[in-house]
Amino acid sequence: MAAERKNFYAFLVAALVTAVIYLLPLPQPLSVGEELITLTTQGKAALAALAFVIILWLTEALPFPVTALAGLLLAYIFGLAGFDDIVGYGFGSSVVIFFIGVLTLSSGLTRSGLTDRFTSIIIARTGFQSRKIVFAFMAMGALLSMWIVNMSVAAILLPMAVTILRRVGHKPLESNFGRALLIAVAWGPAIGGIMTPVGNGANIVALGYLRELAGIPINFLTWMVVGVPAALLILPPAYLILVRVFPPEPISAEDAPADGKLKTVPPGLAPSEWKALAIFILAVLLWLGDPLLQHLGGISIPIEAVALGAAVAFFLPGMNVLTWNEARDDIDWGGIILIAAGLSLGMIIFETGAARWLALLAFSPLGTMTAFLRIFLAVLIVEGLKVFFSSNTVTGVILIPMVIALAGTFGINPWYLAGPVAIATSMAFILVTSSPTNVIPYAAGYFSIKDFARAGIFLTLLVPFGITAAFLIFAPLVF
């Protein structure tokens, strides 16, 4: 009864806050040079609907996918778009197909026995020491996401992490080791994705906008000169924060096998493992080689198509690796609903103009500040705005043109404002729904949205220091 009363009050607070925002008068227009940016009535209503959803997510008053769907219903009630359009923004997005594809890939790797073999190799290097395992996964995620998109890396690491937890008997939501390890699966790729332009979709967006809007070509090396140091400055303290907030329980002698192995694996790969490995390697090569294919032949294969192809490959005649019933049981369909509805809400905020108004409101004071404060606060602002946006690339599309325009207005080198903003778009550590990379490990059920925010708040405050130091120290060396 106490829990029901708490949930009722949380729902009531969410409804009241939503009503207050909806009924407030429109604020005065904001200006960028000679341009006036106005928050429209629809934009204000979109912010009201978003406030409703965020409060319910944070208080866990309703199941998370149900809250997201309620947000879509509220957007329709407020008349922000037609119902088909509201649903289509998210459920019609190729990101949903990507999630189904990579989670099916994850299921296939697990069911084939390949993740047992990979995790046995990891354990052979780290031993059954929970802190070392957490750091190993975070470091692997960072290194892989230099060359593979964040979401793909999280999907690759997820089945290995879950295999370890199941083998040592740690259950969802009952283990700090489970919380720390699965959050590491999200944090590692997010941090590593800032090292190169190909690690995050928003990085590519930034390079295009800098070239087209500011006439500044930023090459691969120029990006890495700031991206690699920034990631290296963030990664070690991120690990320390994670194991301090969720101290991993030591793996007991009873849980750890006497021979120090997760399970006995044959010395050679089984046929199912070879098939799963071939599908996995082909998917990684296509993800990694897309820039080369574009350069050589003008061919581009979307990451979503690669993920879908990998998923379908497991069910081809003669594969005998995965059945549909197994895949259906392994995939968290609630997580897919959550990200699809989150994408819809983010696009509604964009289409109503509320996102542009928020960006201007947040960034306009930066022009008169010192370089340190400008970069530091720009990164912190982006991390705060990530609460409202569920796609790194959409965040970049919204914010980067705005900050380039602001840089021109204030006479600032656009790279020193747009660069930090682009890097910060993948730094979503407060809400699970702020990045698809977070949703993948969340779908395994080992940590809650509240758990993620509890650790993420501390990392959010740390990240601006790392990015600011990297730009101030290393960017002048090549730019």
Image (cartoon, rainbow, N blue to C red):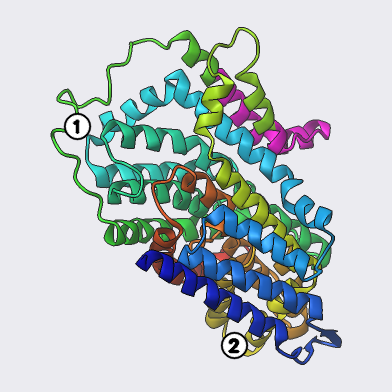
Q: Is residue 425 visible?
A: yes
Residue, disc 2: 369
Q: Is residue 287 magenta?
A: yes
Placement of the C terminus among the 4 image quadrants: bottom right
Looking at the image, residue 133 sits to the left or right of residue 71; the answer is: left
Q: Is residue 470 visible?
A: no
Question: Which stretch did the figure color magenta?
Answer: 278-305
* Above-or-below relation of 80 to 154: below
- What element does badge 2 sit on? loop
| Residue visible at 64% across and 69% down in the picture | 50
| Circle on res. 256 | 1
For mark 2, does the 10 Å Cα neighbourhood hold few (<14), some (14 to 19), or many (20 or more) residues?
few
* Above-or-below relation of 222 to 23: above
> Upstream in the sequence, badge 2 or badge 1?
1
Residue 71 on image: x %, y %:
66, 63
| Dot 2 amino acid type | Met
Q: Nearer the viewer, residue 409 or 218?
A: 409
Residue 450 on image: x %, y %:
42, 62
| Residue visible at 77% across and 71% down in the picture | 78
